[in-house]
Image: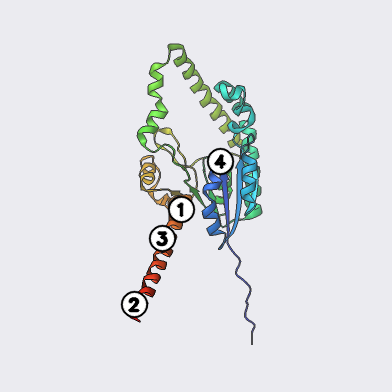
Amino acid sequence: MSKKNFSKKKKQKILFLTAYNEALKSFIPLLDSLDKIYDVYVINEYLPSGPDKKKNSFILKKFNGKLVKSFELLEQPQNRLGAGSKSRWYRLYQIFLKGILYEIKADKKAKQIINQIRPDLFINSGDGRTLPKHMIKYCDKKNIRSICYQWTIGIISKKLVTEYKLNSYSFQKEKFLKKIENKIFSYAFKFVNKFNGLILTIINKKAKLNLKTKNNFTVFGQGNSTKLALIGKSSRKFYIDMGTNATKLEVLGHPLYESIYNNIHSIKKKTTKKASKKNLNQQQVVLN
């Protein structure tokens, strides 16, 4: 008689990548829920300056958590403090000199993480950022599905996108010389992006966005994730208006808000049940 195999089925792995303390806190209810069924791994990109690292390390103690310094060039201390926070030309200079280097570093780290964890699903809090872009690239190569989870509300209408892009109100108020400077900066910025993109393509380190957006403007969640999980129906309408394929969109709610609602609903249910039981006991006393 052959022996039956009673070995436990291997749990599937879910890899979370979040940026900042705010995003990480938003995902705690979802992490708690999934951690009971799956092997959950959490990687958090922290800001190199300020208390972000300390706050995140406290939360990550509960999970298979790991901290990674942000790969966003404009989030580095030299760009958040001093001249970097005041001058856009200084920031452009930084992008031109260091942009390619940060992309190469992010590509290396992304490959290392995916090969090491080998997740069955990759969930991120923003697929337009440098590190998740490269991680999705390696997920696609291994047929690993990915989800970008909306955790905050940014620009919410096509009209706001147009206004932001054209900056029409402030542009009318600007002086002639300022308008000329803006034009020069715009051309310089495009040149730097094109140049950096060409170099990264040549050395095969570019994580190109597949989606062609309307108005040549990309908003949160229009990266290369397999699915985009949204807070509500209004968000879904907005993303369809922005050119996102409807089949990519799923309305799942906000992890934090859904958790609060479920807790309140559970308390109400328990209270109602206790009240019903009390009434039943009182009725039995009366009948007896």
- Relative depth, front residue between 207 and 60: 60
Q: Nearer the viewer, mark 1 or mark 4?
A: 1
Q: Earlier in the sequence, mark 4 or mark 3?
A: 4
Q: Secondary structure at mark 3?
A: helix
**At label 3, which amino acid type do we have?**
Lys
Q: Quadrant of residue 216?
A: top left
Relative vertical location of residue 154 with respect to residue 87 in this rendering, above or below: below
Residue 260's label in the rendered image is 1
Q: Earlier in the sequence, mark 1 or mark 4?
A: 4
Q: Secondary structure at mark 1?
A: helix
Q: Nearer the viewer, mark 2 or mark 4?
A: 2
Q: Earlier in the sequence, mark 1 or mark 2?
A: 1
Q: Nearer the viewer, mark 1 or mark 3?
A: 3
Cβ–Cβ under 8 Å for marks 1 and 3: no
Q: Residues within 10 Å of mark 1 (few under 14, many from 20)?
A: few
Q: Which residue is mark 4?
A: 207
Q: Earlier in the sequence, mark 2 or mark 3?
A: 3
Q: Disc 4 and disc 3: Cα gap in Å?
A: 48 Å
**Residue 185 located left or right of residue 278:** right
The residue located at (63%, 73%) in the rendering is: 7
The residue located at (55%, 23%) in the rendering is: 88
**At label 2, which amino acid type do we have?**
Val
**Residue 274 located left or right of residue 38:** left
**Does the image show residue 287?**
yes
Q: Disc 1 and disc 2: Cα gap in Å?
A: 39 Å
Q: Which residue is mark 2?
A: 286
Q: Earlier in the sequence, mark 2 or mark 4?
A: 4
Residue 268's label in the rendered image is 3
